[in-house]
Image (tube, rainbow, N blue to C red):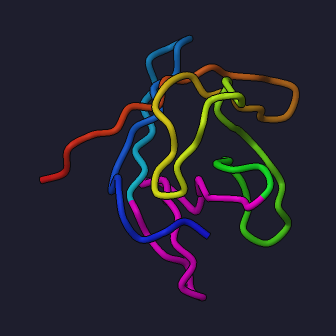
């Protein structure tokens, strides 16, 4: 479980078409802290073995992760840089950018 400090918002910016997804720090119904996408129930969460992943709390399915897995990752916020994801038979490349919040 991620610690409740550090980054409070970031964006994933898709390379192919410039689509932007915003994620804000949030907790689920059980109090686990992660980052929830603003347009739905999609999460980026800390996994004890895999580190930061885009995925599901309950079935531990992984939909995305940082490209450079050798880079040290903090438990407080996902690393900036290149992320990759999969959706069905498609894969996407994103830049994760920490953003200021009002």
Which stretch did the figure color magenta? 25-48
Asked if 96 appears above or below 6 in the picture, the reply is above
Q: Is residue 32 left or right of residue 55?
A: left
- Between 15 and 75, the one nearer to me in the picture: 75
Residue at the image position 40 percent from the left and 62 percent from the top = 25
Count of picture labels = 0
Residue at the image position 61 percent from the left and 58 percent from the top = 45
Asked if 84 appears above or below 34 in the picture, the reply is above
Q: Quadrant of the N terminus?
A: bottom right
Q: Is residue 102 left or right of residue 47?
A: left
- The extreme bottom residue here reads 30
- The extreme left residue here reads 102
Residue at the image position 41 percent from the left and 71 percent from the top = 4
- Between 52 and 101, the one nearer to me in the picture: 52
Q: Position of residue 42 (x, y in %)?
A: 60, 56
Asked if 17 appears above or below 41 in the picture, the reply is above
**Residue 27 falls within the magenta-colored stretch:** yes
Q: Position of residue 82 (x, y in %)?
A: 56, 22
- Between 47 and 36, the one nearer to me in the picture: 47
Residue at the image position 60 percent from the left and 37 percent from the top = 72
**Residue 76 falls within the magenta-colored stretch:** no
Q: Quadrant of residue 68?
A: top right
Q: Position of residue 85 (x, y in %)?
A: 71, 31
Q: Position of residue 77 (x, y in %)?
A: 46, 51
């Amino acid at each position: 479980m991620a610690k409740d400090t550090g980054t409070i918002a970031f964006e994933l910016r898709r390379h192919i078409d410039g689509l932007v997804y915003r994620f804000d720090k949030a907790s689920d119904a059980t109090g686990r802290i992660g980052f929830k996408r603003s347009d739905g129930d999609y999460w980026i969460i800390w996994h004890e073995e895999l580190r930061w992943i885009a995925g599901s709390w309950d079935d531990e399915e992984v939909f995305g992760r940082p490209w450079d897995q050798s880079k040290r990752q903090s438990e407080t916020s996902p690393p900036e840089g290149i992320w990759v994801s999969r959706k069905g038979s498609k894969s996407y490349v994103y830049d994760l950018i920490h953003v200021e919040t009002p």
